[in-house]
Image (cartoon, rainbow, N blue to C red):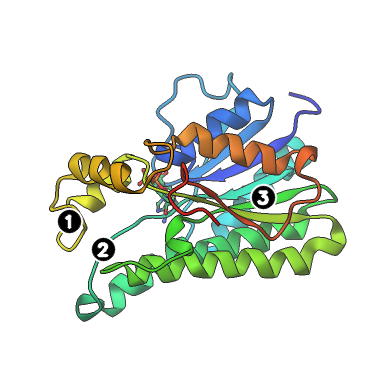
Amino acid sequence: MKNKKVAIVTGGNRGIGLGITKTFIEAGYLVIVGARKSLNIENHENEGIFFVYTDVRKEKYHQNLVKYAIDKFGRLDVYVNNAGFSFWKPISEIEEIFLSEILDTNLKGAFWGCKAASKVMKSKATIINISSLAGKRGSSNNSAYVASKFGMNGLTQSLAKELGHRNIRVNAVCPVLIATDGLNEALKMDYAPGGKNPEKFIKNFTKSNSALMRMPTASEVGEMCVFLASESASAITGQCINVDCGVLPQ
Ligand code: NDP
């Protein structure tokens, strides 16, 4: 384990986050996963995956993750703010508790991650925020989630400018629909697009929107993260890069 690079992935225990965790492991990193439910991988420490209980809504848990990396491995190379959730609601139904929950998790969680990570990071380290195509364009009944992801892209652009002089790069990855448990649950709720039939909705959306006639996978998001963390991306910072099979060419 000595001399291996170290990545922290919030929400790295399932869905897109698990895809990111696995891709960093394949690329030779050690990965520290921060989430509330434990990892469903046996002997994960033998594979170089370490779990630290984390609630991303609270700053102290991000500080804890970073401390774990430094105390155990003496370095932090990559911090991926991935934990988050989506939920469709029209403006008339948005109330205090819901709005706080989505902004605290998706946006403030990323702020605390960036703050904790940037405090200890050295030259060449990188922060990657998992945003969304919802961070690029608005959509109906989705204002809270969309605002959280636009906010994440703003955070990314600003911190790229703020941390660039220390050679710390900050980028965002913007995926489109990936059929994770989280997305499927959200698509079954009232006000979600697609009449509570996630499979049919994703199929129709793919047919009418995707240039490649398919949706991306969690491991393709992971590949983009590994690239952004690598020296091959040494001139790339402040970018919010779509991984969307050509749904929104920019
Ligand atoms: P999932 O619901 O499948 O997974 C969400 C992850 O976030 C879980 O690991 C969960 O872990 C973690 N998480 C949620 N809340 C918290 C919290 N308060 N503290 C710590 N961890 C938390 O979602 P996806 O994999 O689909 O989404 C991952 C990210 O990708 C999100 O930011 C989402 O907005 C973004 N995204 C997803 C797209 C999609 O189509 N799936 C498209 C574009 C972006 P636990 O519950 O154990 O805490």
Looking at the rendered structure, the secondary structure element under dot 2 is loop
User: What amino acid is at disc 2?
Assistant: Trp
Vertically, is 48 above or below 78?
Answer: above
CB atoms at circles 1 and 3 under 8 Å apart? no
* Of 232 and 3, the residue lying toward us: 232
Q: Amino acid at mark 1?
A: Met
Q: Sequence-wise, which precedes: disc 1 or disc 2?
A: 2
Q: Bin the neighbour count of mark 2 within 10 Å (Cα to Cα): few under 14, some 14-19, many 20 and up.
A: many
Residue 59 x/y as whole percent: 56, 64
In this picture, residue 31 sits left or right of residue 216: right
Residue 31 position within the rendered picture, expressed as x and y whole percent measured from the top left:
61, 34
Q: How many angstroms separate mark 1 from mark 3 (CA)?
A: 35 Å
Pick whichever of labels 1 and 3 is earlier in the sequence.
3
The percent position of residue 210, horizontal first and vertical second, equals: 39, 44
Give the spatial CA distance, label 3 vs label 2: 33 Å
Q: Is residue 153 above or below residue 127?
A: below
Q: Nearer the N terminus, badge 3 or badge 2? A: 3
Residue that numbered label 1 is attached to: 189
Q: Are marks 1 and 2 in contact (CB under 8 Å)?
A: yes
Residue 28, by quadrant, is top right
**Residue under the point 74% across and 52% down:** 236
Q: Quadrant of residue 88?
A: bottom left
Task: Report the residue marked by disc 2.
Answer: 88
Tell me, yes or no, whether the two marked residues, 3 and 2, touch with CB atoms within 8 Å: no
Residue 67 falls left or right of residue 192: right
The numbered disc on residue 66 is: 3
Badge 3 local density, few (<14 within 10 Å), some, or many (20+)?
A: many
Q: Amino acid at mark 3?
A: Val
- Specify the label residue 244 is tagged with: none
Question: Which label lies toward us, 1 or 3?
Answer: 1
Asked whether 91 or 1 is in front, the reply is 91
Q: Residues within 10 Å of mark 1 (few under 14, many from 20)?
A: some
